Image: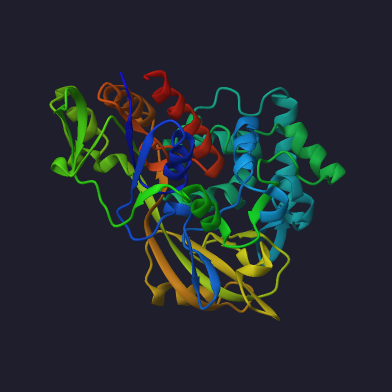
Amino acid sequence: MIINNIAVIGSGISGASIAKMLAPDYKVHIYESSNYSGGLIKCQRVDDILFHKVGGHIFNSKNEKVLAWFWRIFDRDAEFIAAKRNAKVSIGGNLIGYPIENYLYQLPKNISMPIFSELLLALNSSPNNAHQEVQNFKDHLIKSFGLSLFNLYFKPYNEKIWNVDLSNIPLAWLDGKLPMPNHKDIIMSNLLREEESEMVHAKFFYPKKGGSQFIIDKLLCGSNLLLNTAINSIEEADHQGSRRLILNQGSSYADVVVYTGDVRKLHEIINIEDHELNIALHEVKALQSNGTTNILCSTDKMDISWLYFPENNVRAHRIIYTGNFSDTNDPFDKRSSCVVEFSGKYSPAEVMNDLVFLPGNLSPISFNHEPNSYIIQDSETRFKIKKIKALLQKHNIYLLGRFAEWEYFNMDKCIESAFFVADQIRSKH
C-alpha cells in the first residue's frame, strides 16, 4: 500500500506527537473540533495567570526512546526547568509525605502503630511478593499496605477519583502506574527515612513559559492544523484508482486515519460496511469515565507541588501548585496560583463551599469542567479495545491516546504509544 495522506483527528499530546513523527515522510493534516489545541494538557492565561484547565501536566519518562525524541525537539536547558516533586497528603490537618507508605513515621503514633503491626505481620507471612495472586485494585491495595492504611488513605482517595467499586478495577489496567512495593521496602523506607526516587515523576521537567501548552504549540508549529474542524463521518470508497478513506462526505480524503478522540463516539462516525466492526464499536459505547472540575485559584505561598485529600470532609481530591512550577505562571509577588481538582461535575457554587475548608486562603479566579478526564476499565475493556484496533486497522484506521485506546496514559505514555502506531503505519508503506 502506498501512503501519501494521513489524517490525524485530535490535537492533544497524542495527535501532536504522531503528526510530528510522521510529517517528514507523509502529508499530514490534523483536524481539531474545538478552537483550541491541547486536549487534556491545554492551558490558557486568565488575567495573566496560567490555567492548566485539566490538572497540571509535567514531563518525564523512563523510556529512553521517548526522552531522546523529546529532547531532540526541545532545548532542555533553555526551555525547561528541572524540578523535584514535593507532594504531600493531608491527614487530619497534618501534611504527610508522599507516597504515604514511605512516611508513616510522620503520622500520629495511634494511627501509625496499627499500620506497622499489619506490615510486620504480612512480612512474616508472605515475605516475597506483597501483591502475589491479586487480580483487582482493592485486593492489591489491602495486600500491599494492610487494611488500616487502606481505610485511612487508599480507599477514600481512590474512591474519590474513580467513583467505582475498587474491586471491579482490574489490577492489570494500573500496571506501571501504581506503586508495587513489598512490605520490607516500606518498613525500611520508614526506618531509613529515605526520600522516594523511583517514581517516574519524582523529578520532572516543566516549560519555563506557557506550561504544557508550550509543548503542544511547539510540536504543532509548522503543521497543517485545522481548528474548528470536526470529523463527523469516515467512509471508505474507491477514489482516483485506489481505496481511500473519505472524511465528512468528501470534504477531504486520506490513506490513513489516526483517531485520538473518544472511542465511544466512533460508532457515530464510522460509516464502513463491516458488520463485525460495527458490532464491536457499539460494544464500547458504555465504557465509563469521570470528568473533572478544575478551579484556578490564588493561594498563600506553599512549598508544595501536589497536595492530596483522601478525607471526606472535602470533595476536592488534590491541589496542584502550578504557580510553583515556573515564575512565569503568575504575576503574584506575595501569593501564588494553584489548580484545585474535583473528580466529577460540580457547579461554581458547590466548589466555592469546599474552598473555604482547603489550606492556603484560596481565592477563585476561573472555573473549568472537563466532561471526560479519567477513564475506567473493567475486566473486558482491554479485550474489546484490542478487537476494535485489529478491525479498524484492516481499514487503515488507528487508535491512539487515552480515550481512543482507553488507557490511563500520561504525557510520556502517549508519546510512547505514538511511536508504536507510527511504526505500524510505516510498515504498510
From the viewer's perspective, is 185 left or right of 317?
right
Quadrant location of the C terminus in the rendered image: top left
Q: Which residue is drawn at 65% across and 79% down?
A: 332
Residue 291 vs residue 331, the one in the foreground = 331
Q: Which residue lies furthest to the front in this view?
A: 240
> Quadrant of the image for the N terminus?
top left
Q: Choose top left, top right, bottom left or bottom right for residue 334.
A: bottom right
Q: Where is residue 171 in the image (x, y as percent from the top left)?
A: 50, 32
Residue 172, percent from left and from top? 49, 29
Q: Which residue is drawn at 59% across and 38% down?
A: 178
6 or 216: which is nearer to us?
A: 6
Give the vertical position of 378 relative to 31 (above or below).
above
Q: Is residue 219 left or right of residue 60?
A: left
Inspect this view and state whether residue 81 appears.
no
> Taking the image as drawn, is residue 222 in sight?
yes
Work out whether 25 lies above or below 364.
Answer: above
| Model colouring | rainbow
**Residue 157 screen position, x and y as percent:** 54, 53
Could you say which quadrant of the image residue 68 lies in?
A: top right
- Does residue 273 appear left or right of residue 64 in this picture? left
- Identify the residue shown where x is 34% and y is 29%: 385
Task: Work out whether 308 lies above or below 100.
Answer: below
Residue 256 lies, in percent from the top left, at: 31, 30
In the displayed structure, would residue 303 be above or below residue 419?
A: below
Count of marks, rendered view: 0
Q: In this image, 236 relative to 109: left or right?
A: left
